[in-house]
Structure formats: structure tokens, C-alpha cells
Image: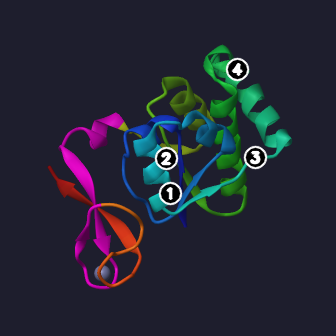
Amino acid sequence: MQVYILDSSAIFLRKGLYPSMLTVSRVLKEIKDDESVNYLSLIDIGVKDPDRSDVEKVKRVARKTGDIYKLSETDLDLLALAIEIKREGNEPVIVTDDYSIQNVARSLGIKTDSVVQKGISKKFKWVRICKGCKRRVDEGRICPVCGSEVYLVRIRD
Ligand SMILES: [Zn+2]
């Protein structure tokens, strides 16, 4: 199974919805604007922090590639989480535009997906749709008409 690991920019730009999404708690601490917090509350994203041993492994590789001083603690955590996902037999894809993360990921044999390249090529916006009656809902997580949960759909702007 592919597991998408989102960095902060992927959440700020509301890059997209993937079947399986994860991030680390340091990313959530960086997310403060209302729009992004609201987006996070609507998408189904798991939060998991990596083992220290995996963080050390990332540091070793980053020293070799020369990226160690460009990677933040958050970046190291995202990469280390990807190692764990891979070890569990899943395929991690880190969603990021950070060159150093991409570079170290490549050395670790981990895929990356660009945020801006695909996210901005077509203008789009997210709308909330009711799971029950398929009505478009302006705000909140519950349909005011039938009481069902809402989900997000990306449409061309
Ligand atoms: Zn409804």
C-alpha cells in the first residue's frame, strides 16, 4: 500500500487528498492558520512520530549527501517516518518541495511527490459535499439538511 507523508507545505497548499496520509506531530505544530487547521480537521490524516533510531539513520545518510545542515527537525522526522513505513512493507511517498528532503529520500530509496508542480498547474478549490444527500455544504463537518458527514472534493476554480 502507498502511504503519503505530508510536509507542512503540502498542508498549507492543500495539495490533495490521498487514500492514506500520515504526518508527524512537528508538522501539526507548524500549522496555525485557520484555513489549514480547518482543512486538517476534514481530511483523514494520521499522526505518527518516528523512532529515534530511524532519525539517526536519516542523519547518517544526510551527512553523506551534505544535506544535514539544511534539514530541520521536522524534515528529519518526516524522512525517518518514511523509513519505518517502508520497513513495514508499505511504499512511502513524501509530499514535499524541499530539495534536501527530496535528495536524502532518493538516497534512502524513498519516493517523493512535488507539492507545487502539480498543485498549481490547474487552479482548483475544495468544496464540502454531504455523504448523505450529496448537497454542497458551505461550512462545518455535518450537513445542515440531513445530518450526514461531509467530505472534501477538489473542483476546478
Ligand atoms: Zn445531506
Q: Is residue 14 left or right of residue 48?
A: left
Please name whichever residue, 118 or 16, is drawn nearer the observer in this view of the structure.
16
Are there few (<14), some (14-19), or many (20+) residues within 10 Å of tag 1?
few
Marks 4 & 1, CB-CB < 8 Å contact = no
Q: Position of residue 54 (x, y in %)?
A: 79, 41
Under tag 3, what secondary structure? loop
**Disc 1 marks which residue?**
41
Kind of residue at disc 3: Pro
Residue lying at the far right in this picture: please name it.
53
Please name whichever residue, 103 or 12, is drawn nearer the observer in this view of the structure.
12
Q: Is residue 124 magenta?
A: yes
**Disc 4 marks which residue?**
64
Q: Position of residue 38 (x, y in %)?
A: 45, 51
Marks 1 & 2, CB-CB < 8 Å contact = yes
Are there few (<14), some (14-19), or many (20+) residues within 10 Å of tag 4?
few
Mark toward the viewer: 3 or 2: 2
Mark toward the viewer: 4 or 1: 1
3D distance between C-alphas at marks 3 and 2: 23 Å
3D distance between C-alphas at marks 3 and 4: 21 Å
**Disc 2 marks which residue?**
37
3D distance between C-alphas at marks 1 and 3: 22 Å
Q: Is residue 136 magenta?
A: yes
**Disc 3 marks which residue?**
50
Q: Say which residue appears at 40% left-offset and 44% top-offset.
A: 35
Residue lying at the far left in this picture: please name it.
157
Mark toward the viewer: 2 or 4: 2
